[in-house]
Image (spheres, rainbow, N blue to C red):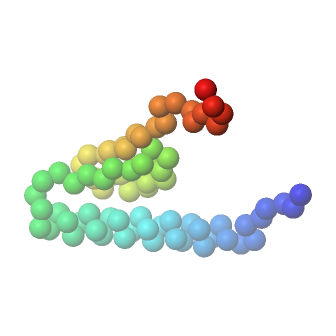
Amino acid sequence: MSQVTFDGNIERMNQRSALIKEEWRNLVWEVRTVFSGRVTYAANFDEYTDVTWWPYLDVMGINAYFPLRSVCTHNE
């Protein structure tokens, strides 16, 4: 079994994350220049913790399409 390492990729990942946050902030700002209503974003249930730009929005949404039951893999 091999060990997984980032080999210096952490800095690039942090830079990418900061760039994405800045792009979303700019997009929200642009929307506000032409739209006077509330600005919202709906994240999927498995990604909402990764959204770092929630503070720029008026309303936070989560699409919570959790599985209602486990999938049966055998005949019942």
* Residue 49 visible within the image: no
User: Residue 59's spot in the image, x, y percent?
Assistant: 26, 46
Q: Residue at x 77, y 64 (%)?
A: 5
> Along the horizontal axis of the image, is 2 left or right of 7?
right
The residue sitting at the right extreme is 1
Total marks shown come to 0
> Image quadrant for the N terminus?
bottom right
* Residue 52 visible within the image: yes
The residue sitting at the top extreme is 76
> Along the horizontal axis of the image, is 69 left or right of 53?
right
> Along the horizontal axis of the image, is 61 left or right of 65?
left
Q: Residue at x 67, y 71 (%)?
A: 9
Q: Quadrant of residue 72?
A: top right
Q: Report the front residue among 68 and 6.
A: 68
Q: Report the front residue among 69 and 39.
A: 69
Q: Residue at x 50, y 47 (%)?
A: 46
User: Residue 69's spot in the image, x, y percent?
Assistant: 52, 30
User: Residue 36's spot in the image, x, y percent?
Assistant: 10, 58
> Image quadrant for the C terminus?
top right
Q: Residue at x 42, y 40 (%)?
A: 65
User: Residue 32's spot in the image, x, y percent?
Assistant: 17, 63
Note whether 30 is above or below 2 in the view shown: below
Q: Report the front residue among 75 and 62.
A: 75
